[in-house]
Image (cartoon, rainbow, N blue to C red):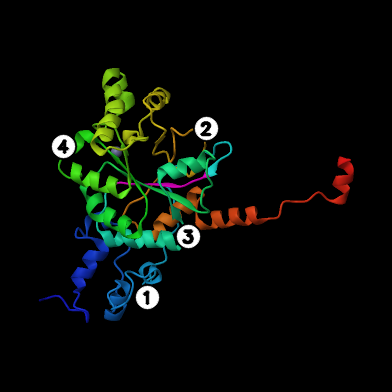
Amino acid sequence: MANRRQPDGVTRRDVLQRLWGAAAAAPFAGLPAPPEFSGDDLSTFLGLEPGTPAAPAEQTVAPSAPAPAPAPWQPPYPYEPLVPENPVVLPMLMYHRATGSSVFEAQLVGMLTAGYQPLSLHNALRGLLGETELPAMPIVLTFDDGWAVQYEAVFPVLKQYKIPATFFVMPGFHEKQEGYMDWDQIADIADFGMEVESHTLNHADLPRLARRDWGAVLAEVVLSKQVLEERLQQPVRYFDYPLGREDEEIQQLVRDAGYDAAVIIGPGVHQSADTPFALRRIRVEAWDPWWRVEHKLDWYGAGPSHFAAQAQENAQPTPTPSGEQAAEGD
Ligand SMILES: [Zn+2]
């Protein structure tokens, strides 16, 4: 064995694969290099010591090796936050592909440690509409396109931590396209209680399709819901416009087709109960280190400090009318 064995029998290569996934190079261009661990750090970090719970939060998030000081995240394009009237700060993350479970787990542990409380889109929407109260630091995790790697790398971690998430899939892709979840896998995530929702039948660019074939648009929106409901025997309530392409007409069709809400890719964390068919999301990657996700949340206005300020505001005692004001009132 060319690999140096760690005391616990785990090779360095095993660890790097667990940490960074098998495809080490391409997806990680521009990310900091994997941190160096000593043998001792390693077994603790991976939760391999007898009696140690799997991946203790602090060690997973902050390994003892000095991490490079990250530069604050900035969006790669000009962005003016669109803040609706009476906004609710309700961040929703949009993921696509994944690499390994360990990198995603580290991100998730960072998120939970920071105090975020993931909730299903269904519960987020009920909170947004004022039917229930949102948790102090709500966050929604959504996964687009039904990639098989989501089942392999992401689902086990969500399952382990019992984190609800929403998967937007295209029924037309799961019969024959390689690299996508098959029906057994989709049924598996649905049976566990994850939301499996519609992303059209074939990942259609709806406004473009509408210019030549409205019937096809109808099929993409209506049939995808029916197929998923029949296959999974559960209601499909949410819609995800492929490529983020939508307009008023498409939004209206989605509403008429019986969906309760829809997500867009327009970035932002401020949601409005008035526009449930245009819920904003922030794009992140399953292999992002937690600090990068946190910087994005912070930049858009849903970082831990925003929620802390919000909590402090809510904790202020409601001002009681002073004697003077009371007298004026009389
Ligand atoms: Zn998509």
57 to 290, vertically: above or below: below
Q: Position of residue 285 (x, y in %)?
A: 33, 51
Task: From the viewer's side, name the closer residue of 208 and 89.
Answer: 89
Ligand 1 in which quarter: top left
Q: Residues within 10 Å of mark 3 (few under 14, many from 20)?
A: some
Secondary structure of residue under mark 4? loop
Of the image marks 3 and 4, the number of the one nearer the N terminus: 3
Q: Position of residue 27 (x, y in %)?
A: 25, 54
In this picture, residue 69 sits left or right of residue 243: right
Of the image marks 3 and 2, the number of the one nearer the N terminus: 3
Q: Which residue is mark 3?
A: 115
Q: Which mark is residue 290?
A: none
Q: For ligand 1, tell me if the residue under mark 2 lies within 8 Å.
A: no
Decide: marks 4, 2 in contact (CB < 8 A)? no
Tell me how far mark 3 sits from mark 4, CA to CA: 39 Å
Q: Quadrant of residue 117?
A: bottom left
Of the image marks 4 and 2, the number of the one nearer the N terminus: 4
Q: Is residue 13 visible?
A: yes
Of the image marks 2 and 1, the number of the one nearer the N terminus: 1
Secondary structure of residue under mark 1? loop
Q: Which residue is mark 4?
A: 175
What predominant SS class does the magenta segment belong to?
A: strand
Tell me how far mark 4 sits from mark 1, CA to CA: 46 Å
In this picture, residue 3 sits left or right of residue 222: left
Task: Name the residue: 36% across, 72% down.
Answer: 63
Q: Which residue is mark 1?
A: 64
Task: Name the residue: 24% across, 44% down.
Answer: 187
Q: Which residues are magenta?
A: 89-96
Task: Name the residue: 20% across, 36% down.
Answer: 173
Give amino acid for label 4: Glu
Q: Which mark is residue 274?
A: 2
